[in-house]
Image (cartoon, rainbow, N blue to C red):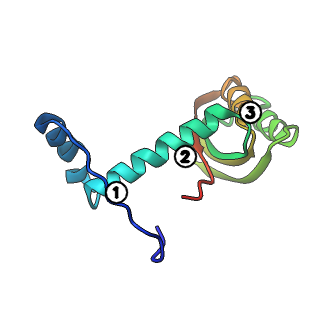
Amino acid sequence: MTETEEIARVTVSLSEGLLHELDKRFVDQGYASRSELVRDMIREKLVEEQWADGDGEVVGVLTISYDHHQRGLTEKITDTQHNTYINILCTTHVHLDHHHCLETIIVRGKPNEIEQLATKIGGMRGVRFSKLTRASMLEL
């Protein structure tokens, strides 16, 4: 929220039990207020819908962990990124130990193209973990 943005107040009715669970699970664990939690939940739902719509441009972060001793895997991951039609904005590569690496790949493009990239890389032999975090360029 910007300082010049108007604030609209709304009232939400919840059962005592649901309110208690909301406070216990979220507000008591770090949210500044119930309002901030609700704003985050609404933004999260809007991002989900933007990804489901599939027409607009979205951003995401693909996190992968893999065995860099797997023959040819590093080259396959790099080649796959070079041969895709989405924008690879940034990659970060970290050595976890002698055998394992962690990479984050920040991407921008159509949802289905990003998901295809995530599936292709995640399914490669030697990739131990793969998770796509869906984000968006919401202007709210």
Name the one closer to the observer, 108 or 74. 108
Q: For numbered disc 2, what is the local secondary structure?
A: loop
Q: How many angstroms separate mark 3 from mark 2 (CA)?
A: 23 Å
Labelled disc at residue 117: 3
Residue receiving disc 1: 36
The C terminus, quarter of image: bottom right
Crowd band around label 1 with a 10 angstrom C-alpha radius: few (<14), some (14–19), many (20+): few
**Residue 49 in sight here:** yes
Check disc 3 and give the amino acid type: Leu
Residue at image mark 2: 96
Q: Residue at x 70, y 36 (%)?
A: 111
Q: Residue furthest left?
A: 16
Residue 90 picture location, percent across and down = 72, 55
Q: Earlier in the sequence, mark 2 or mark 1?
A: 1
The disc placed on residue 17 is none
Element class at badge 3: helix
- Marks 1,3: beta carbons within 8 A: no
Where does the image place residue 103, in percent across and percent down from the top left?
63, 45
Distance in Å between CA atoms under marks 2 and 1: 35 Å
Asked whether 97 or 30 is in front, the reply is 30
Q: Is mark 1 on a helix, strand or loop?
A: helix
Q: What residue type is labelled 1?
A: Glu
